[in-house]
Amino acid sequence: MSPESFEKIVQTHEKRIHYFIHHLGIRDDEGDFYQEGLIALWNACTTYVAGRSDFSTYVNWKIKNALIDQIRQRQRHAEKEEHYRHMTGRPETEYVPREMFDEELWKGIRGMLTENEWKWVTQFIIEDKAVAQIAVKENVSRDAVKNWGRHARRKLKHFPLLMDEK
């Protein structure tokens, strides 16, 4: 199929894409669902077998199902993200730098620190807990937690990505 002939088909059937976006109650601010509808229209053009059904019926079926599939994919993705946030306790808007997931970096850091210093790193830096929260959880004084942090900072001077620039 030539690009010119597909453009004519798009002009003819573009309203169908908009109809199904509206009919399914989809909010398409970025145009992703419209794009999915165009892809479905292209697939309908390339896979249509004459004589089995009317072309417009086949196009309707392909577009509607493609949009429903896209809704389902987004819903599954949102559920997985929600499950991750629930399991990690991280809020949706929290930005986690890529360095936070570098296992080799964390293994190297873990090997340099004492048990208490590692507790400070995991709870203060990674989990973003306050000193008072750590002290209550570990059943020690706030000064003890601050001391762990002081010693850990001294050892972590070689890892500036983890330390605040203050």
Image: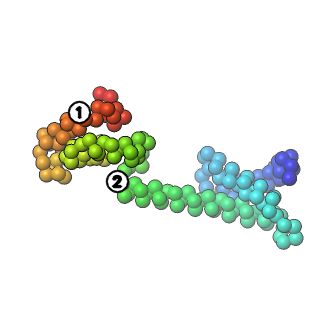
* Residue 67 horizontal side relative to residue 158, left or right: right
Residue 3 drawn at (x, y percent)? 84, 47
Q: Secondary structure at mark 2?
A: loop
| Image quadrant where one finds the C terminus | top left
**Residue 60 x, y percent position in the rendering:** 75, 63
* Marked residue nearer the N-terminal end (2 or 1): 2
Q: Please name the residue that numbered disc 1 is placed on.
A: 154
Q: Which residue is mark 2?
A: 89
Question: Observer-nearest residue: 107 or 15?
Answer: 107
Image quadrant in which you'd find residue 104? top left
Q: Amino acid at mark 2?
A: Gly
**Callout 2: 10 Å neighbours few (<14), some, many (20+)?**
few
Which numbered mark, 2 or 1, is in the foreground of this view? 1
Most foreground residue, 98 or 114: 114
Q: Is residue 130 visible?
A: no
Q: CA distance from mark 2 to mark 1?
A: 29 Å
Q: What percent of the width, then of the height, locates residue 69? A: 63, 62
Question: Residue drawn at (65%, 59%), measured in percent from left and top?
Answer: 67
